[in-house]
Amino acid sequence: MNIHFLRDFPFFEHLDDEHIAEISKLCSTRIYKKGESIFFEGDEGDELFLVISGVIQIYQNNSSRDVIFSIFREGDFFGEMALLQNERVRSASARTIEKSTLCVLKKRDFIPLLKSKPEIMIGILETTLDRLRDANKLITELTIIDVRTRIAHMLIRLSEQYGLPSSDGILIDVKLTHQQMADMTGTARETVTKSLLELQQEQFIRIDQKKILVCNIDALRTMFGAV
């Protein structure tokens, strides 16, 4: 495993090269095809995943449909909850959206690392708390906010996470189908298609080669009350 890749992760960035080199020896690499499952909700979890390339969705199956909680790509990590909890049970499922390459750390190797370098634990806990806050916000949106606003909020979140600034706005640098966006907002695919068309007509967004350009994110926030 390339130590420069590991240094890009926030909770490893403060470690010296010698320690990162030791961590790299603990890592294995796995390649997953597009649409392949990585683990399922309820499975025992004993691995932390670092995304080298590709796109991963974290989801739960709710009443015969998926609800997507998070999208992860290069530089992200996931699967940490099962490692940090005694019961080691996955709270959600994970599968690839694109062909993906993952770095894998086993719990038996990772826990001694956390004990020797507690600052790593602090970095992971900070990220985990941020994700819990995001999850609470998503639950609120799915229960009390209208569909069009939920879709606008999703676009704002994706812009903040995966946006590439350009002269025309912010390009969301991940390709998602309308069904995947529906699963992220708790609505139907047809509703997403209709809402995206309306947002294009109102010049909030443009869609080019299945990627969305947010033309004016400040106007989108103002219009839909996102903070």
Image: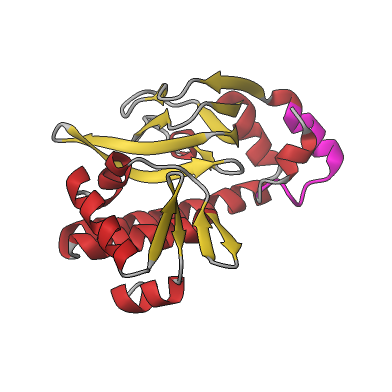
Tell me the quadrant of the picture where the N terminus can be found: top right
**Residue at the far right in the pictured view:** 18
Q: Residue at x 35, y 40 (%)?
A: 177
Q: Position of residue 137 (x, y in %)?
A: 32, 61
Q: Is residue 140 visible?
A: no
Q: Where is residue 143 in the image (x, y as percent from the top left)?
A: 17, 59
**Residue at the far left in the pictured view:** 63
Tell me the quadrant of the picture where the C terminus can be found: bottom left
Q: Is residue 210 visible?
A: yes
Q: Where is residue 73 in the image (x, y as percent from the top left)?
A: 53, 41
208 on left or right of 199:
right
Report the front residue among 123 and 199: 199
Q: Residue at x 60, y 68 (%)?
A: 167
Q: Which residue is drawn at 41% across and 37% down?
A: 57
Report the front residue among 140 and 222: 222
Above-or-below relation of 194 to 90: below
What count of labels does the image hold? 0
Q: Position of residue 90 (x, y in %)?
A: 37, 31
202 on left or right of 15:
left
Q: In which quarter of the image is residue 140?
A: bottom left
145 on left or right of 77:
left
Magenta stretch: includes residue 21: yes
Report the front residue among 63 and 191: 191
Above-or-below relation of 183 to 141: above
Q: Quadrant of residue 18?
A: top right
Magenta stretch: includes residue 98: no
Above-or-below relation of 115 to 133: above
Report the front residue among 71 and 163: 163
Span colored in magenta: 11-24
Name the image colouring. Answer: secondary structure
